[in-house]
């Protein structure tokens, strides 16, 4: 017997409609996890050779993370954009293999404040000998 022209099937369909909204909760959860992962790993990617930079009252030039950085430790050893410490001869050899396009970029020199000035000049001379002409010295901002 049918009352009001409805059957059990139509009542079943009416009670359980298809959901037409997007559930964003899983998406937000994934984004928060990715945010935490990047916040934890970002400081680890910017580590390098530890040097005690001299202090200066100068404006910063730029903060280019892809820039070529040569570090001179307090013992006079050098490294290029990494933790690998090498001799000046090895540095010049590596710099010579850079493409000509990169040789037009500025090389930033991070020299420890206890390094002999003559050693810094030898490194700059080696960089110039490798084909680079733009060199900038990096300091810590004075307070």
Image (spheres, helix red, strand yellow):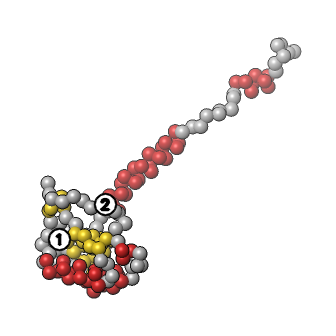
Mark 1 lies on a secondary structure that is loop
Q: Residue at x 75, y 22 (%)?
A: 11
Left of 18 or right of it: where is 107? left
Left of 88 or right of it: where is 101? right
Mark 2 lies on a secondary structure that is loop
Quadrant location, the C terminus: bottom left
Q: Would residue 125 be seen by someone viewing this image from the given angle?
A: yes
Label 2 Cα neighbours within 10 Å, binned few <14 / some 14-19 / many ≥20: few
Using the image, tell me which numbered label, if any, was put on residue 57: none
Using the image, tell me which numbered label, if any, was put on residue 112: 1
Location of residue 92 (image quadrant):
bottom left
Q: Gap in Å between the C-alphas at discs 1 and 2?
A: 19 Å
Hey, which residue is sitting farthest top in the picture? 3
Q: Residue at x 36, y 74 (%)?
A: 104
Q: Is residue 12 above or below residue 73?
A: above
Quadrant location, the N terminus: top right
Mark closer to the chain start, 1 or 2: 2
Name the residue nearer the viewer: 33 or 138.
138
Q: Position of residue 98 (x, y in %)?
A: 39, 79
Task: Tell me if label 1 and label 2 are in contact, CB under 8 Å.
Answer: no
Q: Is residue 122 above or below residue 60?
A: below
Name the residue nearer the viewer: 102 or 85.
102
Q: Residue at x 33, y 85 (%)?
A: 93
Pair 1/2: label in front: 2
* Mark 2, residue position: 63
Q: Position of residue 25 (x, y in %)?
A: 52, 39
Q: Residue at x 35, y 71 (%)?
A: 105
Q: Would residue 83 be seen by someone viewing this image from the given angle?
A: no
């Amino acid at each position: 017997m049918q009352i009001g022209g409805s059957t059990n099937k139509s009542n079943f369909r009416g009670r359980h409609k298809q959901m037409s909204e997007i559930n964003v909760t899983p998406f937000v959860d994934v984004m928060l996890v990715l945010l935490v992962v990047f916040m934890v790993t970002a400081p680890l990617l910017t580590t390098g050779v530890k040097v005690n930079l001299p202090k200066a009252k100068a404006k910063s030039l730029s903060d280019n993370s892809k820039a070529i950085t040569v570090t001179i430790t307090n013992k006079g050893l050098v490294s290029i954009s990494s933790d690998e410490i090498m001799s000046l001869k090895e540095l010049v050899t590596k710099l010579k293999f850079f493409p000509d396009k990169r040789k037009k970029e500025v090389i930033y020199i991070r020299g420890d404040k206890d390094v002999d000035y003559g050693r810094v000049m030898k490194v700059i001379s080696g960089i110039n000998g490798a084909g680079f002409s733009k060199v900038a010295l990096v300091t810590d901002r004075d307070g």
